[in-house]
Amino acid sequence: MLVGQLKIGKSHVELPNSKGKNIYVITVKSGTVRLNHISYNPDGHTWSTPPGNGEKQHIDISEGTHTFHIFVGEQYGKNNKIQLVNPSLFENVEVTYLVEAAKSNKDAVYFFLFLLIFQMNIYPLVLPE
């Protein structure tokens, strides 16, 4: 559960971001969430620049299940960040996601299943290939 921006609790979560191609399957059960794909900016040491490679920086995701193929690059020695943010000030959003490293990555392929419920309790299930 991602709580509203003005409520007590977490209104965003950072997703796993292995360098290379990743597949993100995001299910929004109510409301809307925003997926942010951002790169490191050494001017100010913030994560505020677009990701490059023609990737979108922000994607609004409505109710339903959506699949995104995202290339996670590296800027100044730091991997891009992938975040889910509840843009609402007051409404909570229930969301689940699955992250899979694409088979073209040199690293071993792992599946991460995170169920976000009640105060951002995260229950991972990791399955090696």
Image: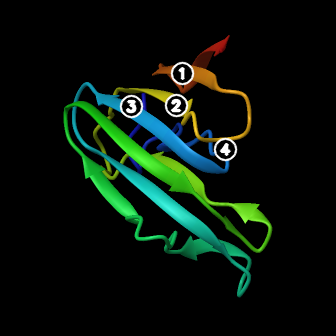
Tag 2 residue: 99
Tags 2 and 1 touching, CB below 8 Å: yes
- Spot occupied by residue 120 in the image (x, y as percentages of width and height): 54, 27
Q: Earlier in the sequence, mark 1 or mark 4?
A: 4
Q: Is residue 43 left or right of residue 23?
A: right
Query: 83 or 110: nearer the eye?
Result: 110
The earlier-in-sequence mark between 3 and 4 is 4
Q: Earlier in the sequence, mark 2 or mark 1?
A: 2
Q: CA distance from mark 3 to mark 4?
A: 15 Å
From the viewer's perspective, tell me whether residue 46 is left or right of residue 116: right
> Of residues 66 and 63, which is closer to you in this image?
66
Q: Residue at x 41, y 37 (%)?
A: 3
Could you give the CA–CA distance between mark 2 and mark 1, rounded to whole angstroms? 9 Å
- The relative height of residue 56 versus residue 30 in the rendered view (above or below) is below
Badge 1 marks a residue whose secondary structure is strand
Classify mark 1: residues with Cα within 10 Å, few (<14), some (14-19) or many (20+). Answer: some
Instruction: Answer few, some or many: residues within 10 Å of disc 3's Cα (few below 14, many 20 plus, some between 14 and 19).
Output: some
Q: Which residue is mark 4?
A: 18
Q: Residue at x 46, y 37 (%)?
A: 23
Inspect the image, locate mark 1, and give the three-letter code of the amino acid beneath it.
Answer: Phe
Q: CA distance from mark 1 to mark 3?
A: 11 Å
Which residue is labeled 1 in the image? Answer: 114
Q: Earlier in the sequence, mark 1 or mark 3?
A: 3
